[in-house]
Image (tube, rainbow, N blue to C red):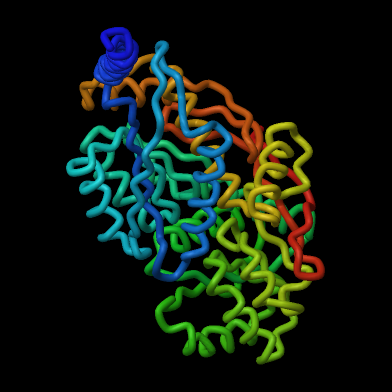
Amino acid sequence: MKKSLLFPLLALLVSLTGLACQTVSSATTPYGGVIRIGHNAPFTGAIPLVALSGREAIDLWLEEHNNQIELDGKVYRFEIIERDNQTSPEVAARITEELITEHDILAMIGPYASAQAIPAGEVANRLKTPMISPWSTNPNTTRNRPYVFRIPFLDDFQAEVIAYFLAEEQRVQNVAILYSEQSDYSRDIARFFRENAQASGMNIVFDESFDANDLVNISSHLERLAQTNAEVLFLPQYYNEVPIIVNQLAQIGWTGRVIGSDSWASTELLTACGINCEGFYFSTHWTPSNTSEPAQRFIKLYQARYNRLPDDLAALTWDAMEILALGLQNCGSLSGNLEQDRECLQQGLAAIDAFEGATGKMRFNEEGDPIKCVLLVRIESQQAQFYKQVCPR
């Protein structure tokens, strides 16, 4: 009888000892071994596909890395806290503060569009919490904000590339500009393009802004455009807006060409535009024809997981997660003091000198902006085909 009780007691003792060791181990790992990351994205509103592509890339990255990272001999898992900014600047700023002050995030991915990223970046920088925007190209997102970083190239450079391409390669003499005054992205890239077009010797024969909330009544602008001798229209609008405008241009019989910016990059645009966008060019960050090892690895993983090719938003968000992990590794270890660890991560991100990800090679300047190449693609048979790559001098 005594012997029969001995083994269960020993087994219980061993079990309790193991549990105690696990408890001590968990207790000695800051934050209980969980790193909280915010995801500030437009799941509703005008551009929900942006948020969905970002979510897919984050989920894929976590899956590929077993949702863990090792720092100073301690293993952490990630907890992603998603919030919908509704494509609203005010909501994006509000949920940034909520994620930082109420959910104790270490860092934040997003927002994506510049209209939301600029005000959210002000909050993140003020509260000294690292923020990485996968898609915002407006210089104001990161300007004088050491806690704000980005993955894409900037609007001033892509506008220069587009203007130079039209003037030098396409030999365009007369150009038109149509943009949304309410959009930080559209308004500012239009300004950069205007400056570069004039410097390249092109004549700006039409330059108007419109109300993006009233696309149905844009016809008066387009009729005035049709009365000019413009050869090409620069249209820096989002993928959901471009087909509406281009299709109306086709209806009034305008035979000129249209060129766009990185906001065009979406299969939705290619499908909705159809033949009316055939032969048009736009600038972008990504093409599946990229043959680099990081790009091809990402494409294979994405196709295996989602059974389709990734878009530029997915590739940019994948790189944002890669940069976040590299910043954490540069930080080295976490203390459990959130303010100190946010500062450590900021310094780790700022220390990244060069990186090659799915969207190409890049190096970072003192503003947290990557210096990287712009891709030009041409729409053929409702697909964006690689045309050329233009890199900073």
x and y percentages locating residue 148 in the rendered image: 36, 37
What is the tally of numbered marks visible in this picture? 0
User: In front: 361, or 245?
Assistant: 361
Q: Is residue 323 left or right of residue 183?
A: right
Residue at the farthest front position: 1
In the image, what residue occupies the spot 49% across and 36% down?
321
x and y percentages locating residue 281 in the rendered image: 72, 62
Residue at the farthest left position: 101
User: In front: 237, or 80?
Assistant: 80
In the image, what residue occupies the spot 26% across and 60% down?
90
In the image, what residue occupies the spot 57% across and 23% down?
354
Q: Quadrant of residue 248?
A: bottom right
Measured along the vertical axis of the image, is residue 388 above or below residue 293?
Answer: below
Measured along the vertical axis of the image, is residue 371 above or below residue 270?
Answer: above
Q: Is residue 359 visible?
A: yes
x and y percentages locating residue 41 in the rendered image: 40, 55
Q: Is residue 10 left or right of residue 97?
A: right
The quadrant of the rendering that contains the C terminus is: top right
Q: Quadrant of residue 91?
A: bottom left
User: In front: 172, or 280?
Assistant: 280
Q: Is residue 335 visible?
A: no
User: In front: 380, or 71?
Assistant: 71
The quadrant of the rendering that contains the N terminus is: top left
Q: Is residue 162 left or right of residue 138?
A: right
In the image, what residue occupies the spot 58% across and 68% down?
235
x and y percentages locating residue 340 in the rendered image: 24, 21
Q: Is residue 111 left or right of residue 57?
A: left
